[in-house]
Every structure is written in structure tokens, then in C-alpha cells.
Amino acid sequence: MADALSTKYCFYQEVPIPEHLNKMLITQEKPLFAVKTIRDVAIFTDKRILIADKQGITGKKIEYCTIPYKSIVTYSIETAGTFDLDAEIKLNLAGGYKVELQFMKDKRMEELLFKVYDTITEYMFASLT
């Protein structure tokens, strides 16, 4: 049985920041980089992770998920082993919500995994001061 307070997003590769998501950022927010998901993109900024999740057959319906760094309570990283097809970062958010950022295996997976991990670490701790 799936946990009702848990969500998983699959990341593939770094991509340019798309214009349709750039307009969702506030003026005090600096976009850092974007990552391709299964059907859309996630943007990492200096304030949050913004994930666009296309839904339905046509993909015209989009759910936008915002994860402010300040809402991350704990997090962990799991690297891929020899036979693993993925690696992941698991976020535990305030309120008991869990988000898993899964990274699909390719030549640059580990580089992207640690770029995301380092970004979360830097801005999560910056939001505590």
C-alpha cells in the first residue's frame, strides 16, 4: 500500500530553464538550474524546488509542486551500486510529508545527484540562519 503522504519524482538530466516555469518565479528568487523529469522539468532556485508534473494523456494538466528548503526537516542520499538503475535523495518535510527525488542511471547521474544534494544542503542551512 502506498503512503498517502509520499511522492516520487524521477530526474534524468540537467536542461535549460524553460520559459513557462521561469515566469512562476518571484522577483527575489534566483533560478540555479533545471532538471528534466519524466514529462516536464524541476527548477532549483535559491529559495525552493519547483516541480512541474504534467498529468493526463495529453499532458495539458500540470501540477506545480513547491518544496521550500526551509520545510525540509531531514534528508538522505542513496547512491547507485553496481547493478542499481537509480540513486535517490529522500526528503522528509514538515508535517510528515515525504518526497523522493529519484535519479535514473546514465553517465552523468552521480554528478547530477550530488549537484542537487549540495544545492539542498547549501540553501537548507542558509534558510536556518
Image: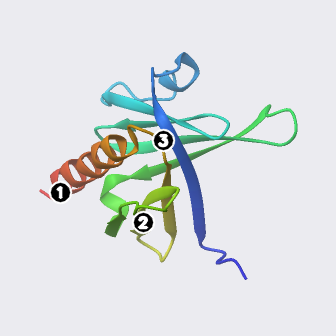
The answer for how far apart the CA atoms under marks 3 and 2 are is 16 Å
Q: Residue 27 lies in what quarter of the image?
A: top left
The residue sitting at the front extreme is 82
Give me the residue at 41% from left, 71% from top. Answer: 94
Give me the residue at 47% from left, 34% from top. Answer: 13
Q: Is residue 68 above or below residue 60?
A: below
Amino acid type of disc 2? Lys
Q: Mark 3 highlights which residue? A: 50
Q: Earlier in the sequence, mark 3 or mark 2?
A: 3
Q: Earlier in the sequence, mark 1 or mark 3?
A: 3
The percent position of residue 29, horizontal first and vertical second, equals: 32, 31
* Mark 2 residue element: strand
Closest to the observer, 63 or 81: 81
Closer to the camera: disc 3 or disc 2? 2
Amino acid type of disc 1? Phe
The answer for how far apart the CA atoms under marks 1 and 2 are is 17 Å
* Mark 3 residue element: strand
Closer to the camera: disc 1 or disc 2? 2
The residue sitting at the left extreme is 129
- Which quadrant is home to the C terminus? bottom left
